[in-house]
Image (cartoon, rainbow, N blue to C red):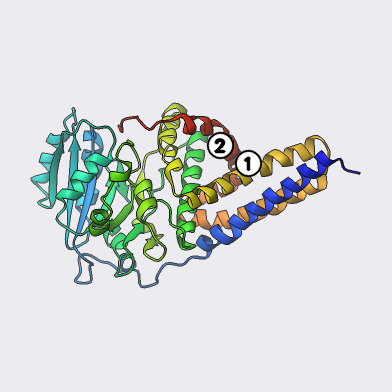
Amino acid sequence: MMTLFEQIVLWAFVAATAVQLFFWLFFFGRLALYKEDENDPAERSNGPSADDGPPVSVIICARNEAENLKAHLYRILNQTYRSYEVLVVNHKSSDNSLDVLASLQSKFKHLRIVNCDNEKTGKKFALAIGIEQAKNQVLLLTDADCIPASNDWIRGMVAGIDENTQIVLGVAPYDETPGPLNKFVRFEACYTAMQYLSFTLAGLPYMGVGRNLAYRRELFDRTDGFRKHERLASGDDDLFINEVAKKGHVGIRLNPDTFMYSKPKTTFREYYRQKTRHFSTGKYYKLHHKIFLSSLTMSHLLHYLLGGVLLTLKISIMFALLGYAVRMGVVMAISSVILKKLHHRSLRLWIPLLDVVLVVFYFVFAPATLMNNDTQKWN
């Protein structure tokens, strides 16, 4: 006969596992089954065409990014899209960024340089200036260290914008390099993408990533841009999208040609600083978004913690193993499909281990997230 404590632990484990299955089947399952339009312009492009969409302003904010600008910017300047400008906002750089940009501008007339001397921290102030200076109504954002997967990046991203869709969320994977940290960094980035893409498909858009994001300028102007969270150094992407995104006017892009790649952090210390800065904005999300995301995280954590208690105290080994097997079977099946779509299929065999490491990740970053005041400078 089970004691009251044992019954509570058992049923709490069952409940946590059930919540996890709900999220994986109801939300993430949508992404696994999602198919992009077969007539995607990015699939049939052989160069600039009259079928291109509206003029686009690509905006890149850069601070001491001379090396990245020299190495990567030409990939964006050589896109096949017919009508676009590339606007680089140079935010108080102390390296030779201006020299690099001037050299590129002599070859590419659609490159524009805007200098930002604002002393405030954070990328959003430079971005606001870039948006103000942009000539076109469709804005496509990325970073100086990012490399488009193809010369059809602009065409593919803009293809998602129509009379109803005002925001397009793209995918921004990290490069694969040797080592366990890289595996986890790429897995965690994919898991984040799974969340914001799946929630968008379910009619609950809540964030995007500034490395690959498009929206109409009128949306920015109509909502006063970053004014509501201008005191925070970060949040130019997720907080803005969280504020303005509505069901029905946010689209996603999964065409590999629209992916935007970048190099991940290579040390835990760098990664820790990056993630604490990113997570610091989550507490400013809308209430219902915070409830959903907290439920997803807590159920994941409790699934393992309570399952461990069931096994350690031998309360119900059968329930613990059965619950783990059922959930992991669902996670493996859905994750494998999504990771293939995100071009990270090499992570599929590591899912059982990385799924556990993700729980440790919650413990490590939770205190830092609560204490972080988001005062760090970008770059």
Amino acid at dot 1? Leu
Q: Residue at x 59, y 37 (%)?
A: 357
Q: Which of 5 and 209 is in front in this view?
A: 5
Say what secondary structure mark 1 lies in.
Answer: helix
Does residue 170 appear left or right of residue 347 in this picture?
A: left
**In this rendering, is residue 253 above or below 75?**
below
Q: Give the left or right position of residue 213, taking residue 298 as reference.
A: left
Q: Where is residue 99 in the image (x, y as percent from the top left)?
A: 12, 35
Alpha carbon distance from label 1 to label 2: 8 Å
Q: From this view, report whether residue 66 is shown above or below residue 345.
A: above
Query: Which amino acid type is marked by label 2?
Result: Tyr
Classify the position of the N terminus by image quarter.
top right
The label shown at residue 301 is: 1
Front position in the image: 247 or 180: 247
State the image coordinates of residue 269 (x, y, percent, origin top left).
44, 26
Q: Mark 2 points at which residue?
A: 362
Q: Is residue 358 visible?
A: yes
Give yes or no for contact between labels 1 and 2 (Cβ–Cβ under 8 Å).
Answer: yes
Residue located at (40% from left, 66% from top):
248
Crowd around label 2: few <14 · some 14–19 · many ≥20 (10 Å): some
Most foreground residue, 224 or 292? 224
- Taking the image as drawn, is residue 352 in sight? no
Q: Return the mark for residue 79.
A: none
Residue 222 place in picture, x, y as percent: 25, 56
